[in-house]
Image (tube, grey):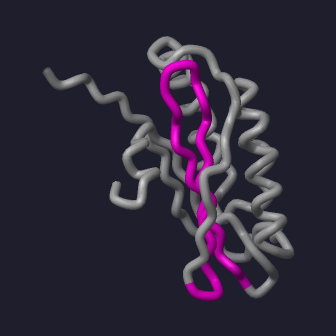
Amino acid sequence: MLAKHFAVLLTLTIALPHGTFADSLKSTAEARQLTDRVMQKVGEGNIESGLQLIKPYLVIPLAEFDVMVDRLKMQLPAMTQRFGKSIGHEFIREDKTGETLFRIVQIHRFERHPMRWVFYFYRSTDGWVLDSFKTDDEIIKLFPDG
C-alpha cells in the first residue's frame, strides 16, 4: 500500500526589477549565520518572522516574497496536523559549486517528519545574495543517492 505523499514546494527564482538591488552578505559564513537565524525562528513555529530575516538579501520583488510568505503561512496548519508540532531545526550541509554558487540545506523538524529547506546563494559583484530558496518534504533528497 502506498502512503499518500504530502508535498510543499516553494521555489523562488525571479529577477529584480531594473535598478533594484538586494543587500549582500560578506561571506559564506554570514550566509550560514543568516540561515541558522531563519531556521531558529521557523523551528520555533514562527515561519513569518524567520522569512522576514531573509527579505533584504533576496533577489525577488517584494510583492512576490509577500505572496510566498502568505502561502506558506496558510500551509503551516496542514503541515502541523500531518507532521505534529514544530520541534526545532537541524543544519544538514552546505555545498559550494565553483566560486559563485553556494547552497545551504537545513531541516525544519516536526514531531513526526522533517521539512527540507534549501537556500541558494550567488556571489554578486557586491557580495553574497540569496538567489532562491525552497522548502518541501522530500527527505529522500537529503541523502547522497536521493
Query: Image point 82% across, 56% down: which residue?
Result: 33
- What are the residue bounds of the magenta stretch? 98-124
Determine whether 104 is above or below 6 in the image: below
Q: In the image, residue 9 lies at what x, y percent?
A: 44, 42
Query: Image point 70% across, 80% down: which residue?
Result: 123
Query: Image point 72% across, 41% down: which residue?
Result: 39
In this rendering, position of residue 43 left or right of residue 105: right
What is the residue that sits farthest to the left in this orientation?
1
The question of residue 106 being in magenta is answered with: yes
Determine whether 97 is above or below 95 in the image: below
Q: Quadrant of residue 51?
A: top right
Query: Image point 34% across, 55% down: which residue?
Result: 146
**Which quadrant would the N terminus be assigned to in this image?**
top left
- The residue lying toward the viewer, choosing from 145 and 137, is 145
- The residue lying toward the viewer, choosing from 126 and 91, is 91
- The residue lying toward the viewer, choosing from 90 and 43, is 90
Q: In the image, residue 84 lies at what x, y percent?
A: 54, 14
Q: Quadrant of residue 57?
A: bottom right
